[in-house]
């Protein structure tokens, strides 16, 4: 058997072998720009134009709403110097770019970083105006209005843009990022499972970011002709990145890097066999040594303050709006079965503190005593959590309340009291916490929530292990944007009655 037939590649090679130099970007041709590079340029240009438009709109509105500023002209006048809009945009966009908000990684979707960067830009503008235009009186109303409006319109613009991209990717496969897997066969299979799991737990269902165009065994590199044709095939599929699944098996990583880069292909190492911590990290060079540096954990300090403010305002407004429906539900519960309207159970919250969670009562009054008799019928795999369909303890009104998750609404009282958040890991009863493994206790480092990733990724249709994986994913990647997405997806899941008991 020849070398060529011994190598397995999951695409059909062209009958004509392609010379290696045809896949080299240094060849004297004008069409050698990587498709991924072009798409990245387009994305950055669109994002910059949208941000600039929103910032200009915010300042225009602020100038009209606030107290006029003597000597200040946003757009300038025909017979005078240009207005202040150009330096405003230059400073604001420059700080956003320096903060990585136009980069290729997930940092561009960090809303807390966006808010901090926009606030810093306003402070720099204020200092610059004071130092270089001392004769211009700065109106506090205009400055504060511009700051608040910029935060609102830019964050809204980016959130809507993200939802638009997600929906377009879901509808059009051609808009998904084309990738190619290169590695040992066993690692390639693990990589496929890993990517499928990421898509499965994506809160935007069926919104796959990656479109797998093919795979190739690392042994293909031992045949120069077939390797050249493999590179040419990858380029013909407009692949933006090649995921390396077996980095430890590569003896000449620098050469592989140059081979891919010279073919216009970006390289990403997928740590399939290497167990890396799931904390957000960044690669830093210390001299000639490559290191991983951990970033600050989310939901700490100012992040916690912003999340708490949002929770307090939103939960208070919802309680005011739902006052009459609360009274109607309470009356139905009283008429349906004897017992209290509210069910209070001890749950474990932040730092392992115990608190009473509020819920509308959906079971008979002695449900806790009956649970011991039903433990054998627990339908959640793993046994850490207790759930079962057709639970005989549930009342008639309780079934309706559970179907639409209306029984959870009184937990807004826990949110106002600071015991819970709108979004976070669910607070579990003492019975469930006692069965935890030690690594599950990380859930208690943040406020528990009314809803979370568990609820929007199948709700009751996930296993105990998957529940804690989703909780850990939320903790490690928290942002205000993620909270908004989960709340929106929760409404959809409740209306569709997905996974409800």
Image (spheres, rainbow, N blue to C red):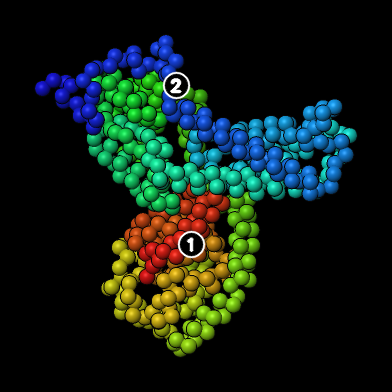
At horizontal 49% and vertical 37% (from top left) the residue drawn is 105
At horizontal 23% and vertical 22% (from top left) the residue drawn is 14
At horizontal 61% and vertical 70% (from top left) the residue drawn is 321
- Image height of 340 relative to 292, above or below: below
Image position, residue 475 (x, y; %): 48, 52
- The residues tagged by marks 1 and 2 sit, at their Cα atoms, a distance apart of 44 Å
* Disc 1: which residue: 491
- Image height of 348 relative to 472, above or below: below
Question: Which residue in the rendered view is the most extreme toward the top?
Answer: 28
Q: Secondary structure at mark 1?
A: helix
Q: Residues within 10 Å of mark 1 (few under 14, many from 20)?
A: some
Image position, residue 192 (x, y; %): 30, 41
For the residues bearing labels 1 and 2, Cβ distance under 8 angstroms: no
Query: Disc number at residue 33?
Result: 2
Q: Is residue 62 left or right of residue 389?
A: right
Quarter of the image for the N terminus: give it.
top left
């Amino acid at each position: 058997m020849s070398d060529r037939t011994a190598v397995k590649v999951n695409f059909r090679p062209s009958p004509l072998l392609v010379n290696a130099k045809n896949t080299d970007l240094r060849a004297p041709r004008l069409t050698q720009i990587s498709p991924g590079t072009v798409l990245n340029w387009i994305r950055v240009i669109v994002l910059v134009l949208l941000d600039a438009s929103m910032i200009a709109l915010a300042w225009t509105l602020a100038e009209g709403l606030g107290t006029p500023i003597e000597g200040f002209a946003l757009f300038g006048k025909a017979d005078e110097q240009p207005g202040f809009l150009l330096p405003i945009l230059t400073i604001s966009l420059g700080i956003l770019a320096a903060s990585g908000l136009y980069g290729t990684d997930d940092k561009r979707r960090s809303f807390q970083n966006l808010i901090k960067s926009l606030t810093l830009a306003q402070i720099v503008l204020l200092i610059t105006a004071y130092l270089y235009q001392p004769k211009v009186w700065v109106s506090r109303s205009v400055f504060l209005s511009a700051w608040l409006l910029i935060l609102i319109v830019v964050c809204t613009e980016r959130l809507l843009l993200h939802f638009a991209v997600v929906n377009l990717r879901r509808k059009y496969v051609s808009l998904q990022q084309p990738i190619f897997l290169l590695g040992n066969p066993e690692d390639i299979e693990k990589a496929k499972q890993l990517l499928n799991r990421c898509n499965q737990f994506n809160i935007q269902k069926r919104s796959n970011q990656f479109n797998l165009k093919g795979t190739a065994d690392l042994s293909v590199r031992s045949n120069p002709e077939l390797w050249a044709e493999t590179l040419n095939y990858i380029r013909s599929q407009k692949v933006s990145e090649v995921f390396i699944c077996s980095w430890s098996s590569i003896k000449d990583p620098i050469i592989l890097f140059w081979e891919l880069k010279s073919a216009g292909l970006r390289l990403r190492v997928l740590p399939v066999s290497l167990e890396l911590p799931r904390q957000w990290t960044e690669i830093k060079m210390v001299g000639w040594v490559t290191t991983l540096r951990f970033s600050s954990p989310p939901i700490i300090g100012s992040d916690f303050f912003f999340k708490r403010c949002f929770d307090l305002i939103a939960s208070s407004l919802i309680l005011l709006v739902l006052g009459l429906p609360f009274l109607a539900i309470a009356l139905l519960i009283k008429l349906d079965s004897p017992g209290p309207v509210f069910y209070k159970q001890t749950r474990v919250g932040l730092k392992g503190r115990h608190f009473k969670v509020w819920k509308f009562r959906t079971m008979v009054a002695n449900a806790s005593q009956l649970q011991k008799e039903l433990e054998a019928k627990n339908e959640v795999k793993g046994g850490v959590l207790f759930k079962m369909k057709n639970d005989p303890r549930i009342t008639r009104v309780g079934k309706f309340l559970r179907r639409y998750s209306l029984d959870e609404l009184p937990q807004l009282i826990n949110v106002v009291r600071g015991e819970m958040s709108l979004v976070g890991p669910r607070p579990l009863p003492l019975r469930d916490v006692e069965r935890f493994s030690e690594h599950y206790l990380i859930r208690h480092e943040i406020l528990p929530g009314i809803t979370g990733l568990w609820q929007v990724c199948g709700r009751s249709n996930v296993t105990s292990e998957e529940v804690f994986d989703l909780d850990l994913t939320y903790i490690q990647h928290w942002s205000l944007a993620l909270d908004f997405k989960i709340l929106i997806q929760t409404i959809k899941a409740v209306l569709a009655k997905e996974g409800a008991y």
